[in-house]
Image (tube, helix red, strand yellow):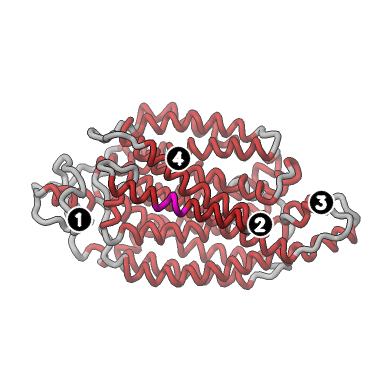
Amino acid sequence: MNGTTRNGAEPARADGRAWLGLAVLALPTLLLSLDMSVLYLALPHLAADLEPSGPQLLWIMDVYGFMIAGFLITMGTLGDRIGRRRLLMIGAAVFGLASAAAAFSPTAEALIATRTLMGVAGATLMPSTLALISNMFTHPGQRAVAISVWTSCFMGGTAIGPVVGGLFLQWFWWGSVLLLGVPVMVLLLVCAPLLLPEFRDPAPGRLDLVSVGLSLAAILPVVYGLKAAAGGGPALVPLAAVAAGLVMGTVFVRRQLRLPVPLLDLRLFRQPSFGPSLGVMMVGAVAMGGTFLLLSQYLQLVAGHSPLVAGLWQVPPALTMIAATMAGAPLAARIGRANVIGGGMFVTAAGFVLLFLAPAEQGTPVVVTGLLLASVGLGPGAALLTDIVVGSAPKERAGAAASMSETSGEFGIAMGVALLGSLAAAVYRTGTTVPEGVPDRAGDTLAGAVAVAEDLPADLAAQLLGPAREAFTDGLNLAGAIGAVTMVVFGALALVLLRSAPSAGDGMEREEDAAGHDGPAASGAPEDAAPPTDGVTCRVPAAADES
């Protein structure tokens, strides 16, 4: 991409301090995404220690992600108002304290509560990191590299979470995996004032607390409905909760359209590629979030590997995902971003087909190969989609755009855990018969069945675990089939809808055009779509997308 200013000069290139700052921002990004999956391998130990119910186990796994998703929009907008570095440091302090509290939780309820606090604190960190990157790297080429690094940390953290968890669980108790956040946040608090600049919106407007409440009222009832459905209770309560969430979501959207300074800037959706990019990003995150949860359990509870061995089996897919994410921008320069994103989703679909075919016995090579293909397919598109979303926003709305990008990814991962986890739990309960005299919790989750089987005679344990492992694998197979079909559909949509997606930095060009500096707005957005900025614009050739 060849960005230039209005007077023909190239935008300023970032110095060494900015790249050191990027390394600092990469740390919380890696940690926050890692914390979404690091407990996956700890499930058997956690289940044996705290004895959570099936719904409680799902809450422990993904309440963190849902709190991040629920508060990201609010925190992104708050960062634009009070300063992104300041919000980053506040969140780092709270996250470190909450991580320590979660590590020593004595009950399932306490762990859910502390993971909730971790999610709220995490929501202050994610949009701040991406928004600061968009401010620190104004040169389009450097910004693309910086976003690729950031996305690699985000994707890689989710991928290596089980690996790190396996290493810690080999020698320590399950809570040790949560203590990783403490030293990382201390390092961030020390380095941030030295290496990171402060940015804020000079005219931020008022934070609409009603919109904050409505955003949570839209998300949390839907989550509760999914959890209640997973618990196997009466269907009326889950349906009512989901319906209430959808109603609140409609009210939230209508309010944002009326407010002069909305919490969620829906004007960004007027850019043709903005909404599809968020949608494709969310679908990929849904698929991967649920898949990592199920595969981590499969490797331990079905295939019988120790936490360390199960983690090591996931090293090749994790490394592949990081490498594929970094390769996204160079590959897009050759064949076009739409082809990279859409084609990658077809590769991911092939990986999900393998998960659909995975057997309950000796299936480790099959599921690991399926995960590797899925990682290869989704990795390159992740950075490119983030680049499109952030490039659609003017500079002072970078926090809002970053929060929307992060909301899509984090909410997608949490929804994947909830949807595919709930689906697999339902299949498990249907296919599992608990023998007479065996505690009922063996029929709730496979982790519960394995924990119960340790205290049973060998013949009774085999009678319980054989069908239980088959039932869990059936749930994994069904999730693989759904994932394959979804990837094919959205891959085809990406090929069509993202062919003319804007490049990074185009948001500043549209911003000037809307202000009347350079003629008609290139995007077709109305004149009030963005306030004027400092006069810097990035010119990108029309053919750059498919060059």
Give the residue displayed 38% in from the left and 65% down from the top: 341
Provide residue 277's location: percent of width, then percent of height.
36, 59
Which residue does the numbered mark 2 point to in the structure image?
234
Q: Quadrant of the C terminus?
A: bottom left
Q: Quadrant of the N terminus?
A: bottom left
Amino acid at the residue labelled 3 = Val
Q: Nearer the viewer, mark 4 or mark 1?
A: 1
Q: Of the residues under marks 4 and 2, which one precedes in the sequence?
A: 4
Which residue does the numbered mark 3 point to in the structure image?
452
Quarter of the image where one finds residue 235: bottom right
Q: CA distance from mark 2 to mark 1?
A: 47 Å
Give the residue displayed 55% in from the left and 29% down from the top: 97
> Is residue 471 magenta-colored?
no
Span shown in magenta: 246-250
Q: Nearer the viewer, mark 2 or mark 1?
A: 2
**In contact (CB < 8 Å): disc 4 and disc 1:** no
**In contact (CB < 8 Å): disc 4 and disc 3:** no
SS majority, magenta: helix
Q: Of the residues under marks 4 and 3, which one precedes in the sequence?
A: 4
SS of the residue at dot 2?
A: loop
Which residue does the numbered mark 4 point to in the structure image?
123
> Is residue 248 magenta-colored?
yes
Q: Of the residues under marks 2 and 1, which one precedes in the sequence?
A: 2
Which residue does the numbered mark 1 point to in the structure image?
525
Amino acid at the residue labelled 1 = Ala
Q: Is residue 313 visible?
A: no
SS of the residue at dot 4?
A: helix
Provide residue 460's location: percent of width, then percent of height.
88, 59
SS of the residue at dot 3?
A: helix
Q: Of the residues under marks 1 and 3, which one precedes in the sequence?
A: 3
Q: Residues within 10 Å of mark 3 (few under 14, many from 20)?
A: some
